[in-house]
Amino acid sequence: MERAILAKESKTGAKAQEQNTENIKRRLDMLDRRLDDIDSMVSAVIERVMSQPITINVACPNCGKNIDIALIGNKRLGA
């Protein structure tokens, strides 16, 4: 009787571990897609900065003063 209970617990434990592994794989795939999306956005911004100036306006959290940050890049020909 004890062997049957232990075998049943072993099967349910293995099933729970398998579900946990599948959940981890699914979450890693989601993270991978998100990182790919972020990479695409950053690449697009970098291409824009390298081809023309871009200005970022940020408000200081302490004093509320607006700060302009200008980014200017140089594109290398043939790169």
Image: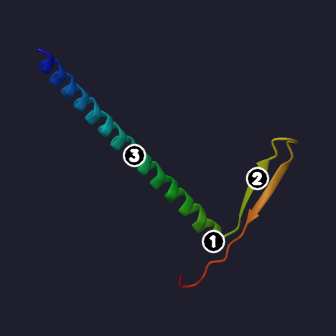
Please name the residue that numbered disc 3 is placed on. Answer: 28
Relative image position of residue 34 (x, y in whole percent): 46, 48
Q: Is residue 17 above or below residue 56?
A: above
| Gap between marks 1 and 2 measured at Cα | 18 Å
State how far apart marks 3 and 1 are (Cα). 32 Å
Q: Nearer the viewer, mark 3 or mark 1?
A: 3
Most distant residue in the bottom direction: 78
Q: Would residue 64 be found to the left or right of residue 31 on screen?
A: right
Q: Measuring 31% from the left and 39% from the top, which residue is drawn there? A: 21
Q: Is residue 64 left or right of residue 20?
A: right
Say whether disc 1 or disc 2 marks the residue closer to the N-terminus. 1
Q: How many badges with numbers are in the image?
A: 3
Residue 32, horizontal then vertical, whole percent: 42, 51
In this rendering, position of residue 34 left or right of residue 49 = left
* Circle 2 SS class: strand
- Residue 1 lies in quadrant: top left
User: Residue at (39%, 46%) from the top-left corner?
Assistant: 28
The crowd level at tag 3 (other Cα within 10 Å; few <14, some 14-19, many 20+) is few
**Mark 2 sits on what residue?**
57
Residue under pointer 1: 50
